[in-house]
Every structure is written in C-alpha cells, then in structure tokens.
C-alpha cells in the first residue's frame, strides 16, 4: 500500500507540475513551453521517487542516466527554439481552437497538450520510478549491467546522431539536401532509435532489481514505458511526421529505399 501511495503522490505532483508549466506557457504565449518542460518532468519524477523510495545502487544509476538524457533533451530544445516564435504545430492548434472560443483554447491546451504530455511522462518514466520504489535497495546485477550497456549505446546514437545532423544543417551548401552520412547512413532516424534504446535499457535495469524484490508481474511493468515511447516514435509523433515532410522528394525517396527506417543496418545497394 505504501508503494502504491508513493506512485499516487508522484502522479499528483506531476499533475501540479504540468499545470504550472501551462501557466508559464500562457504568460509566454507559447505552448511550445511544454516541449522544454518535457525532459525536466522526467528529472522531477526520477529524483522524487529516489527520495521517497528505496532505490539502491541500481536506482541511483538509473536516476542519473534519466537525468542526463532529460537535461540534454530539454537544453537542446531550448537552444533550438530560443528567440523563435511558437512552433508551427502549436500555432496551428492555437488558431484552430481560438476560432471557437478562448475558453476552448484554454481547455484544449491544458488537456490535449500539457496533461496528455504529463501522462506520457508518467508512463515512459516507469522504468525509473518503479525501480526506485520497488527496487528494494539492491545493487547492480549482471542483467542490470546489460541494461546499462544498452542505455549507453542508445545515448551514443541519439547524441551523435543529433550532432551529425546539426553540423550537416549548419553548412549552407547542404540546404535542401538529405543527410545520409555517419549514423544516418545506417538508419533514417538514429536519434529516435537511440531514445527508444535508452528506455529499453532502463527497463531491463528495473526488471533485474524488481524481480528479486516484488516478483515477475511487477517486474514486467517497467517495459510499458519503452513500449509506449517506441510506438510513439515509430507510429505517431516521430517517424511519420518527419517522413511526411520529405515524402515525394526524389533525393529522399532514393535515401528511403536503401536505408533502414529505424534499427541500424547496412544500406541496400
């Protein structure tokens, strides 16, 4: 019961956090604030459950890994959006909802952007939050070390992929061209693949500790997080939106035909 109460407490805290972020977005007149707050929401949950739970060495490591990932993501989004107007996606939603009424805009923004994002944060973060709450203070097992190695691989793919793309786009000579070098030669979305892989690694770390303390059923719950983030990246907000933007362009279609969509593999001849 204590562990369930801790999870409920975490959920309520996250709800309050997203409401505060919503208020800040209203002041800034930019719902893109939700994207910057997204990563810090994971940091909040990681440290909160680390404090109220019995995390052990595995929990400490998972909390630090999640913080590294989230901080890098939020800082990157902030720097990318700094000085720019509201993202076109949120601007389109704003115009659509404001046409109905300002109240519709407020309610839809709160529910469909901020609270929905909060729910996604809660589910995706399950590997870390459940490890901290149900891990029982255990150390690192061989299985947890495997999870750590998977996380490291994922982090490399995301960080290096983002760096390679930023460097490519910064060169004026590459304007209108398709990035197909470095990690992008082996997968069309190395950053998305890396992000998914990191959460699978954390889920494996959580599984190894929770299984010993709480049994099979509870130890499988952390995998809901990577399943959700992988589904979102592959089918909803990641790959489909980005690839729709390039669809029909000759250079893109050639690149698409020879390059793996997600899991890295050698390009087709």
Image (spheres, rainbow, N blue to C red):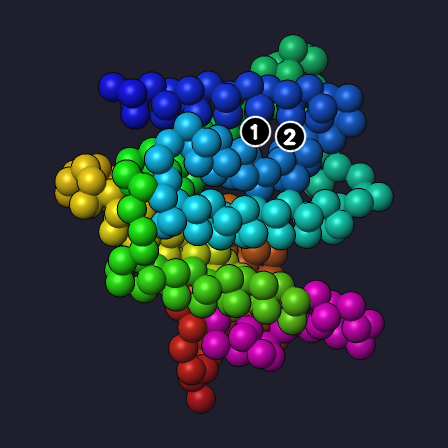
Above or below, 28 relative to 82: above
Name the secondary structure under disc 2.
helix
Residue 172 in the magenta stretch? The answer is yes
Q: Does residue 238 appear to the left or right of 80 in the view shown?
A: left
Q: Does residue 101 appear to the left or right of 46 in the view shown?
A: right
Q: Which mark is residue 74?
A: none
The residue at 42%/40% (across/down) is 125
The residue beneath circle 1 is: 113
Q: Nearer the viewer, residue 181 or 62?
A: 62
The residue beneath circle 2 is: 93
Indicate the quadrant where residue 184 lies. bottom right
Q: Local crowd at mark 2 within 10 Å, few (<14), some, or many (≥20)? A: some
Magenta residues, start to end: 165-187
The residue at 68%/19% (across/down) is 23
Residue 204 in the magenta stretch? The answer is no
Q: Residue 265: percent from the left, percent from the top?
A: 40, 77
Q: Does residue 249 appear to the left or right of 207 in the view shown?
A: right
């Amino acid at each position: 019961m204590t562990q369930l109460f801790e999870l409920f407490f975490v959920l309520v805290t996250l709800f309050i956090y997203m409401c505060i972020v919503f208020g800040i977005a209203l002041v800034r007149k930019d719902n893109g604030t939700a994207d910057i707050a997204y990563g810090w929401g994971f940091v909040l949950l990681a440290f909160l459950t680390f404090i109220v739970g019995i995390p052990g060495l595995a929990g400490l490591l998972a909390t630090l890994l999640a913080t590294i990932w989230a901080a890098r993501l939020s800082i990157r989004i902030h720097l990318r959006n700094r000085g720019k107007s509201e993202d076109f996606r949120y601007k389109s939603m704003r115009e659509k909802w404001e046409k109905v009424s300002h109240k519709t805009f407020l309610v839809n923004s709160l529910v469909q952007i901020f609270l929905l994002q909060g729910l996604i944060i809660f589910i995706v973060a399950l590997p870390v939050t459940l490890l901290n709450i149900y891990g029982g203070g255990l150390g690192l097992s061989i299985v947890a070390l495997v999870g750590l190695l998977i996380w490291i691989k994922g982090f490399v793919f995301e960080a290096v992929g983002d760096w390679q793309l930023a460097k490519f786009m910064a060169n004026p000579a590459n304007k209108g061209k398709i990035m197909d070098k470095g990690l992008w030669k082996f997968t069309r979305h190395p950053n998305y693949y890396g992000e998914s892989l990191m959460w699978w690694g954390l889920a494996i770390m959580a599984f190894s500790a929770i299984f010993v303390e709480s049994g099979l059923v509870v130890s499988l719950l952390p995998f809901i997080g990577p399943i959700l983030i992988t589904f979102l990246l592959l089918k909803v907000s990641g790959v489909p939106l980005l690839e729709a933007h390039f669809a029909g362009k000759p250079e893109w279609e050639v690149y698409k035909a020879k390059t793996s969509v997600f899991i890295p593999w050698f390009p087709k001849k």
